[in-house]
Image (cartoon, rainbow, N blue to C red):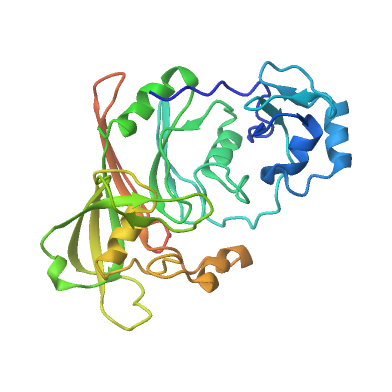
C-alpha cells in the first residue's frame, strides 16, 4: 500500500491548489530550493520575497518559512505560484450527474483533468471548483487531456478513497470509442497484451520486456463518421475496452495494430505541428478518442451506476 500524502496546509486559492515542492538534497535553503524548482520557473527572487513576507511560504505543518531557512531532504514546502497564460478551452463542461458525494462530467477534448505543467486553470478540476464553489472536489480517476468523455469527481474527502478504490481495484467498467483507419480483420475482437512503460521526460509510452501490465480489447464496429485520415483510407468506428489503466494504453495499442487513432500527435509518430494547434487557439483537430461510458457498483450504496457521454468524437455535444 502506498503512503498517503498529507494535505496541503494552504487552502486552494480561486480553485487552484498551492504548489508542493519536495526538497531533493540536504544543505539547501528554502530560497535555493524554490529558485531551482521546475514548477516555479519564471517566479523571480522578488516574487519569492513578497510571498515570504506575506507568510505564504510554509512547511507541511503550516509554519511560515523564511527564504534563508535551511531545509532537509524529503521535506516539503508549499506556496502559491503565478498562474500560466493559457489559451481558453472553448468547450463547456456538462454535468451528467451530481449527488451529495460525487459529480460526473462530460470532459471535452483539450481540457486537462487536473492542473499539470502549463495547464492549470484550463482543467476540469479548477473549472468545477469555481463553478460549484466547492474547493474539496477531487478526481477519482483521470483522462488524458486530449481524451474526452465521462469523468468522475468526489465532492468531499470522506468519500474519496471509496470511489478511487473502484478504479484502483479495476471494478469500474469503462468503454471508449475511437475513429481510426478501418481494418476488416478487427471486426472480431482482438485482445492486445503487453508491457507498457513511460519514463519521466519522454512524451510517449513504449512497449517493454517483462510482465504484462496492459490489456485492451479492440473491436471494429463499422464505418466511422466524421473526418477521414491523412492517407485517404476509409475511417472505422472502434470500441475499446481497457482492462488495465496504463498511460496512453489505448493510443499505443491502436498504433501497434496499424490503426492509429485519427489526429493523435504522438502515435505512431510525434507530430509537433498537430500538437501545437491548441496552443495557437486551433481546436479543430482533436484526438478522436472518447471515454463513452462508465459503469460500477456504488461503493457506498451498492447501487449500480452507469454514465454515458453525450459527446461526439469531434468534441461537439449531441
Counting from the top left corner in percent of width and height, residue 114 is at: 53, 41
Please say if 26 is above or below 38. above
Counting from the top left corner in percent of width and height, residue 315 is at: 43, 60
Residue at figure coordinates x 50%, y 31% from the top left: 138
In the foreground, 263 or 290: 263
Q: Residue furthest front?
A: 27
Give left or right: position of 274 versus 15.
left
Residue at figure coordinates x 69%, y 24% from the top left: 72
| Quadrant of the snapshot with the C terminus | bottom left
Residue at figure coordinates x 47%, y 69% from the top left: 270
Residue 142 in view, yes or no: yes
| Quadrant of the snapshot with the N terminus | top left
Residue 313 quadrant: bottom left
Give left or right: position of 18 versus 199.
right
Give the number of callouts. 0
In the foreground, 25 or 227: 25
Give left or right: position of 169 versus 135.
left
Residue at figure coordinates x 58%, y 37% from the top left: 131
Please say if 222 is above or below 100. below
Residue 14 quadrant: top right
Give left or right: position of 182 versus 266.
left
Counting from the top left corner in percent of width and height, residue 161 is at: 40, 23
Residue 228 quadrant: bottom left
Amino acid at each position: 500500500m502506498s503512503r498517503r500524502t498529507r494535505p496541503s496546509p494552504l487552502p486552494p486559492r480561486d480553485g487552484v491548489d498551492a504548489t508542493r515542492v519536495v526538497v531533493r538534497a540536504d544543505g539547501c535553503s528554502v530560497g535555493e530550493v524554490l529558485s531551482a524548482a521546475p514548477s516555479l520557473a519564471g517566479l523571480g527572487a522578488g516574487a519569492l520575497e513578497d510571498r515570504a513576507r506575506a507568510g505564504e511560504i510554509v512547511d507541511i505543518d503550516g509554519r511560515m518559512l523564511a527564504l534563508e531557512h535551511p531545509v532537509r531532504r524529503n521535506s516539503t514546502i508549499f506556496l502559491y505560484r503565478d498562474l500560466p497564460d493559457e489559451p481558453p478551452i472553448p468547450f463547456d463542461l456538462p454535468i451528467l450527474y451530481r449527488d451529495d458525494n460525487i459529480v460526473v462530467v462530460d470532459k471535452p477534448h483539450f481540457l486537462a483533468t487536473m492542473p499539470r505543467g502549463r495547464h492549470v486553470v484550463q482543467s476540469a478540476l479548477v473549472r468545477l471548483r469555481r463553478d460549484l464553489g466547492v474547493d474539496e472536489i477531487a478526481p477519482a480517476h483521470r483522462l488524458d487531456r486530449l481524451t474526452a468523455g465521462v469523468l468522475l469527481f468526489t465532492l468531499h474527502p470522506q468519500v474519496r478513497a471509496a470511489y478511487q478504490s473502484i478504479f484502483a481495484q479495476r471494478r469500474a467498467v469503462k468503454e471508449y470509442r475511437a475513429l481510426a483507419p478501418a481494418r476488416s480483420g478487427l471486426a472480431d475482437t482482438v485482445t492486445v497484451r503487453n508491457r507498457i512503460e513511460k519514463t519521466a521526460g519522454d512524451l510517449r509510452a513504449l512497449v517493454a520486456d517483462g510482465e504484462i501490465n496492459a490489456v485492451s480489447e479492440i473491436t471494429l464496429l463499422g464505418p466511422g463518421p466524421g473526418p477521414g485520415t491523412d492517407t485517404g483510407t476509409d475511417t472505422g468506428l472502434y470500441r475499446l475496452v481497457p482492462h488495465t489503466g496504463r498511460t496512453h494504453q489505448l493510443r499505443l495499442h491502436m498504433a501497434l495494430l496499424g490503426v492509429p487513432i485519427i489526429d493523435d500527435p504522438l502515435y505512431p509518430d510525434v507530430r509537433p505541428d498537430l500538437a501545437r494547434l491548441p496552443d495557437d487557439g486551433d481546436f479543430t483537430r482533436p484526438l478522436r478518442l472518447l471515454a463513452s461510458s462508465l459503469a460500477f457498483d456504488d461503493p457506498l450504496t451498492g447501487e449500480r451506476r452507469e454514465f454515458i457521454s453525450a459527446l461526439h468524437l469531434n468534441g461537439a455535444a449531441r
